[in-house]
Amino acid sequence: MPFQMQININSGVSPDTAKLPSAQDVWASLQRRVSVDASPLHRVSFDPSLLAAKVGDQIFWTNNDRQPHWPGLKNEDGSIDDIFFMPYQIAGDDTSPTFSPGVAGRLEYVCSIHRDPPCSEAGTIEVTPTLEVLVHLQGIGDLAFRDNEFAGTRGQSRRLEGFQLQISPPVAGLSMRYMAHLQGIGDVPFVNEGQFVGTRGQCRRLEGFAIELTGPVAANFDVVYMAHLQGTGDTGIFRNGQFCGTRGQSRRVEGILVRVKPR
């Protein structure tokens, strides 16, 4: 189910810097707030200026300022798409049209009424693809997770035997493939997203894996991932086809975490 985030436009002082909320922050709260500074110079700024969202999430704008605002998409050529987010919103109007991003990437927007410096600053929405993660665990079977969620166990000595990844909903021009290193078999070939890699019912541990993005827009994204390994704990972060895990050490993978994000 898509998440809902709210952006409030109100009076206030904009922070000097903006920090991108983590995916856990986004999942924990269904609302995000952006304020507009109605200073004597009418400088318009958004807080937070960098917002994390998922493809399909619903984003709300509410104007609590004393003057009207109209957030619009800033195109690469500098033009503003005035109808991208919402219609003209009168000060004090508590209605909130929604915007649901259908494409992953970075979207920059400004108030189209106060677009010219020094009156306006840009806000950015980092839209990441939604990734469905399935893992098959010893003694449990298949379990489903989302991207940036730890999929597996810690401290239970339970082997991960296989996994499956799927970008959902699909992102035009973006796909992925992945491989695994299995006990007693070694490296198995890459499979395309939506396919299961590993084994079920063979008591065979997965010892390592690699994931890479494919498609015409793959260069615009990174896939980052880590694993929890028997005897060593969490690995560092790997990305874009790097092998995560071990070979020849008889060391099981007990859990994984995967995320796709714009560059």
Image: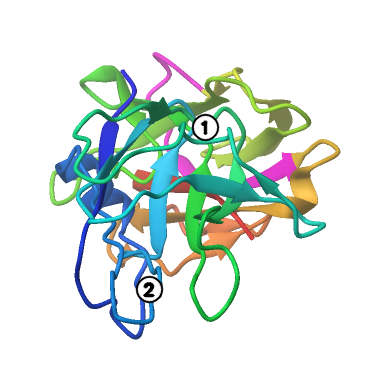
Closer to the camera: disc 2 or disc 1?
2
Element at label 2:
loop
Q: Which residues are magenta?
A: 199-213
Q: Nearer the viewer, residue 69 or 180?
A: 69
Q: What's the amino acid at mark 1?
A: Pro
Q: Residue at x 58, y 77 (%)?
A: 117
Taking 192 as reference, is 34 left or right? left
- Which of the numbered marks, if any, corresponds to residue 41? none
Q: In this view of the protein, can residue 208 be seen by the observer?
A: no
Taking 170 as reference, is 214 left or right? right
The stretch drawn in magenta includes residue 210: yes
Q: Nearer the viewer, residue 1 or 158?
A: 1
Task: Name the residue carrying label 2.
Answer: 42
> How many neighbours does mark 1 have within 10 angstroms: few (below 14), some (14-19), or many (20 or more)?
many
Q: In this view of the protein, can residue 32 be seen by the observer?
A: yes
Element at label 1:
loop
Q: Residue at x 40, y 75 (%)?
A: 43
